[in-house]
Image (spheres, rainbow, N blue to C red):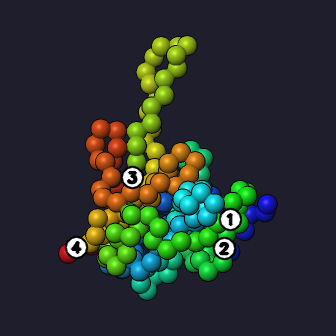
Amino acid sequence: MSVDVSGWQPDWLPASEQVLKQSTALRDLVGTTITDAWVAWNLEHDEWFTDLPVVLSFAGRGQLEVCWQKFDDLSVTWDTIDTTVRPRAWVEWPLEWRRAAHPALVSNIGSSVRAVAMTEHLFQTERVDQPGPASRVWLVGGLWFETTGPGVHVFNALDENGLDAGTPPDGSGHRLTALAHSDT
């Protein structure tokens, strides 16, 4: 089956590069209201199909489309997905765009964005064949939208999208790096 995600034109980059590229547009979301939210839904299994973008619509700013794949690939696009057109992917299951189909989305529709941050986690590797210091690097792992509601975190769930409401962890190998916040 071919992939036709309702007009989506992904823009895959390493997450840190994508956040840098999109930083101005993401900062401009502060003060706007989340008016709608969509995810692709697997009709055969009646569950969220986590491999396709999470779509957030903002009053006066259009539609943000966020998708994670692999270990560090992030696509952030704007206004390419038509949620009235059924997506087709590499799976045989029928899919559709479903409005507010995740609790983290439902609880934030109508909320105003107060801040935008990237979430990062400390990634550490060690060579088992040669003792020595570990290699450590901070990796971007999500986009956090602090809202007048509980907030929404769209994150890399290891080769698929993850969603959560509430504030993501900060400390103990995790950190929030602000991109923008309101003064009020």
As helix, strand or loop, the secondary structure at mark 3 comes to strand
Residue on which disc 3 sits = 119
Residue on which disc 4 sits = 183
Position of residue 53 measured from the top left corner of the image (x, y, whole percent) = 57, 64
Position of residue 121 measured from the top left corner of the image (x, y, whole percent) = 40, 43
Of 67 and 136, which appears nearest the observer? 67
Q: Which mark is residue 94?
A: 1
Residue on which disc 2 sits = 86
The span from disc 1 to disc 2 (Cα, nearest Å) is 9 Å
Q: Residue at x 68, y 65 (%)?
A: 94
As helix, strand or loop, the secondary structure at mark 4 comes to loop
The span from disc 1 to disc 3 (Cα, nearest Å) is 33 Å
**Tag 1–tag 2 contact (CB < 8 Å):** yes
Instruction: Look at the picture and state if 134 lies above or below 170.
Output: above
Q: What amino acid is labelled 2 in the image?
A: Arg
Which image quarter is the C terminus in? Answer: bottom left
* Residue 120 placement, left or right of 167: right
Precedes in sequence: disc 2 or disc 3: 2
Of 164 and 119, which appears nearest the observer? 164
Query: Closer to us: mark 2 or mark 4?
Result: 2
Which image quarter is the N terminus in? Answer: bottom right
